[in-house]
Amino acid sequence: MDTHTSGSVDGWHDGLPVGKPGVMAGGMGLTLHSVQIGQARAVRIQGRSITTAFHKSTVAGPVAVATLGLQGDEQVDLSVHGGLGKAVYAYPLEHYPFWQEARLRAGVIGGDAALEPGAMGENLTLTGLLETGVWVGDVLRFAHCQLRVTQPREPCYKFNAAMGFATAAKAMAQSGHCGFYLAVDEPGTLQAGEPFELRPGPRQTSVAQMFQTKMFKHMR
């Protein structure tokens, strides 16, 4: 009889498979598709001049990762992005077609142009890992650094402006395509194209569950 009910045993942690490098449950590959950083700049939103670092550009080669984020990435509104708990923002590449279609339906000028990685304001564009498959406390283990999931991203008026239509935040709330913030447990470097490993944390609250509880204000 198997007497093991918890802990890490034979590749499992509390009844859940422990990730291998570049692989998660179900055999899906986990890859860092691209890395983005952004500098603060003034933009006009709803007739006001707003300073934001939402707009990101991809970076080739290794990027240094410190406890407060990626080297060269500025953070303006620390209530939204920044600090130890929200040092890095990750977003699934798999959601990009959803936003492409949403922009087309909304009649956004230039909405037929492909969205480039970083268009969601994310530092890391990931493949193989969605909000429904990650929990607060899970760890993304890369070759040279370690990041821990802390919370989902909450949309704001800046996201509406970036997407080009007024109901973008509501669309994020309804779809759950929010991405998630990461704390830097082990500083180091990241590079586009590298695989990573998902290591389960306590698995008490999923990113999707936490996001849903936060989104009632956008669903009305």
Image: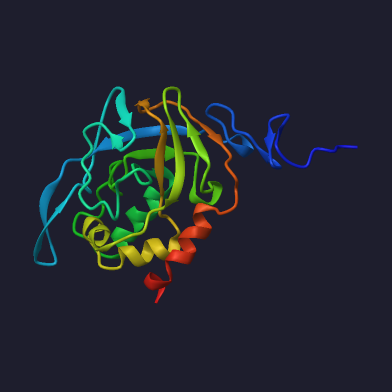
Q: Residue at x 60, y 52 (%)?
A: 204
Q: Position of residue 70 (x, y in %)?
A: 29, 34
Q: In the rendered view, does 48 fall on the left or right side of 94?
A: left
Q: Is residue 82 above or below residue 175?
A: above
Q: Position of residue 178 (x, y in %)?
A: 40, 54
Q: Quadrant of the N terminus?
A: top right
Res 105 → quadrant? bottom left
Question: Which residue is farthest right?
Answer: 1
Q: Is residue 7 above or below residue 113?
A: above
Out of 55 and 12, give the one closest to the viewer. Answer: 12
Out of 59 and 181, give the one closest to the viewer. Answer: 181
Out of 32 and 97, give the one closest to the viewer. Answer: 32
Q: Is residue 25 above or below residue 159?
A: above
Q: Residue at x 23, y 59 (%)?
A: 158
Q: In the rendered view, does 66 fall on the left or right side of 185?
A: left
Q: In the rendered view, does 192 fall on the left or right side of 176?
A: left
Q: Residue at x 30, y 68 (%)?
A: 167
Res 109 → quadrant? bottom left
